[in-house]
Structures are given as C-alpha cells and as structure tokens.
Amino acid sequence: MRSKITGTGSYLPERIISNDDLAKTVHTSDEWIIERTGIKERRVAGDDETTSDMCFQAAGKALEASGTFPEEIDLVIVATMSGDMPMPATASFLQQRIGAVNAGAFDVNAACSGFLYGLSVADNFIKGGTFRKILLVGAEMNSKFLDWEDRSTCVLFGDGAGAVIMEPAGDDSGVLSTHLSSDGSMWDFICVPGGGSKYPSSHETVKDGMHFIKMRGNETFKVAVRTLEKLVMDTLAANNMKPSDLAMLIPHQANLRIISATAKRLNLPMSRVAVNLDKFGNTSSASIPIALDEVVREGRIKEGDYILLEAFGGGLTWASALIKW
Ligand code: UT7
C-alpha cells in the first residue's frame, strides 16, 4: 500500500524585504545577492506571528484541497528547526488550533531536509497500516534566528510554511521511495549553537550571538553540489528510472547555483525545475512543500507524472523522495 499526497497548501507572510532593503543595513548589494544566490526578496513574519500560526494557514489550505476534516487526521507532523518554543512541539500547537482532536503530534528536526524526513516517516506509517491520514507541514520562522547584522546569513533565509495531507493511494501512484542520509561530522557547517544543553542560554551566549544561525557557506555549498548530484542519480537508480522519465524536479531552495547544478546533472531544462527562492529566499524545511503547492496550483504537474524531491541542510542531512503523482 503506497502513500500519496492528496492535498497541498502554503502560507507566506505578507512583509517583503528586498535585497535593496538589506543593502541599507548591511554591507551587501542586490547584484551580489542575485549573482551568488538567485534571491531577490524574502518574506518575513510579523512580530506577533508564530511558526504554528503559519502552519495553521498552510494546513487549512491542504485540508481543504484534499477534502479532509481535521478530526479525520491520525497524526500531525511539523518539520521545523524554528518552532514556537523548544518544548512543546510546534505540532502540538497546530493539532489544537486545527482541531485534529484524534491525532498524535510531534516535530521532526532535520534542518532543511526536515520535510523529506517527515515525508518518509508519514509514508512508512501509512504503508505499515498504522495511520490513514497524516498532516505534514514544513514551517520555518528563520527571521527570528538571524543576526540581521551578519551579511553572510541574513540575506539568505526567509519565513514560510507548506503543508500536505498524506493517505493510502489505492492505486500505483504515490511515494515510490524515500532516501535519508546524514553526516554529523559536519554539524558545525550550519548550526544555532546556543540555547541547548551544550551551551545553555545565558547572558554570555546571548552576548556572543550564539542563538543565531551560523553557516560556513562556501564549504556547505561544495558538499551540497557534490552530494545532491549523487543523490538524485541514486534515487532514480533505486527505482530503475532515468532522468528523462522525470516530469519535474522540486529541489530545496538554498541557492540557484546548487539547483542549476543538480538540474544539469539530470539534463533537465530549468522549465521543469521548481524555483521560488527568488521570491522567498531559503525557507529551510518549508521550501519544498511551498514549491510543491505552487506547481500543483499552477497545474504544472499532472496525474501519472514522476517528480523528484531533494534537500540538503544542517546536520549535515540530505534526503530525497520519488513520487508518481
Ligand atoms: O539550506 C541549507 C543548505 N545551505 C546551502 O546549501 C547554502 C550553501 N552556500 C551558499 O549558498 C553560498 O556559499 C553563499 C551564498 C552562502 C555564499 O556564496 P559564495 O560564493 O560561497 O561566497 P563566499 O562565502 O565564498 O564569499 C565570497 C565573498 C567573501 O568576501 P572575500 O572574503 O572574498 O573578500 C564574503 O565576505 O563574498 C563576501 N560576502 C558578501 N558580499 C556581499 C558574503 N556575504 C556577502 C553579502 N554581500 N551578503
């Protein structure tokens, strides 16, 4: 029994911050950001908005699209590294807010790969027959974890949420395979060092900015390109498929140069690659479900299409999923 996505939804905060806006506060330029990343602007949540508020908006649209009532949901999973609080899980806030009164709820944290890790968990719960309807959301409020004076990170990230409803497929469509990998030896390539058991929050950690996202960008970039090129080919090989079988690539939105390199390896024209980082920046675990919702609503994928989802991020982690739509 395969699992399939029966509804998608997304939410982006209203406030737009352009590259020129950032150039007024840090030493950067629209040209540098576009050339090095492909990002033109990003969305930033309001001061009173929370990650679960964004989840609620995206989840509502996914429930509506799939014709699912909240009380039918068996499990709520939120993939996030920027939840409402360290505890409880953001999924608990969402479960209550959405009225999923019969559901379990927990978060998955695999940084930017989180949505695909969550997809793999949901897929296996459905395949194994444990649950029938799962709400999976990828949501990030990166803006509240950024040092807005650090040009090497503040220009990259954005806020947003994307949601899917997953249930048994009943035919040969759905998730064909998921692939999860990691290498924790490079944990410090992307991290928020402070506020956990290693460096508990203190005046010192806050003074040193340890509650902000730190990234060794160039080193991460090199590993990402190499890893993703192999990952997409391995994912196809595991399903006895070739790049030309793919209708669409839905990659994590970290950097247009990384996305283009993966597309080139697959020999896919960019018209068959979902790209939204120009508008939203890197929304971490939300980037794939937001991009998926866009291509679904634009009618860019149709029944029977093979689509490949792939992500790379903090951990380091990387993951992929091959889906027959
Ligand atoms: O989502 C999780 C996974 N994340 C990724 O995969 C991100 C991977 N990394 C990247 O996307 C890229 O490495 C960045 C976009 C972060 C940086 O691009 P880069 O081509 O690797 O640049 P760099 O870090 O090597 O920096 C080049 C120069 C440096 O100046 P010097 O040392 O050459 O004088 C930086 O200080 O660019 C400088 N720089 C900036 N200049 C203007 C760094 N940030 C900025 C900035 N504006 N915002």
Image (cartoon, helix red, strand yellow):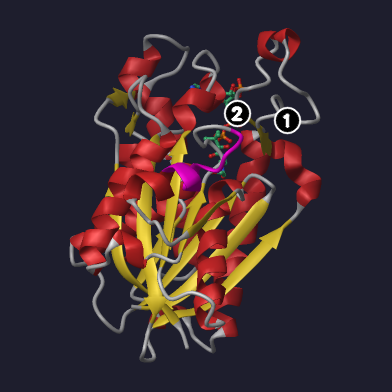
Q: Position of residue 77 (x, y in %)?
A: 49, 56
Q: Is residue 186 above or below residue 239?
A: above
Hey, what amino acid is under mark 1?
Gly
Hey, what amino acid is under mark 2?
Ile
Residue bearing the label numbered 1: 196
Any part of residue 269 in sight:
no
Q: Is residue 110 above or below residue 178?
A: above
Q: Where is residue 297 in the image (x, y as percent from the top left)?
A: 20, 61
Quarter residue 213 falls in: top right
Ligand 1 falls in which quarter?
top right
Any part of residue 7 in sight:
yes
Q: In this view, does 17 lie to the left or right of 87?
A: left
Q: Earlier in the sequence, mark 2 or mark 1?
A: 1
Front position in the image: 74 or 155: 74
Which label is found at residue 213? 2
Q: Is mark 2 on a helix, strand or loop?
A: loop
Quadrant assignment for the C terminus: bottom left
Q: Position of residue 180 (x, y in %)?
A: 64, 65
Q: What element carries label 1?
A: loop
Q: Where is residue 287 in the image (x, y as percent from the top left)?
A: 42, 49
Q: Residues within 10 Å of mark 2 (few under 14, many from 20)?
A: many
Highlighted range, magenta:
86-93
289 falls in the magenta region: no
Which label is found at residue 24? none
Q: Is residue 56 above or below residue 102?
A: above
Q: Residues within 10 Å of mark 1 (few under 14, many from 20)?
A: few
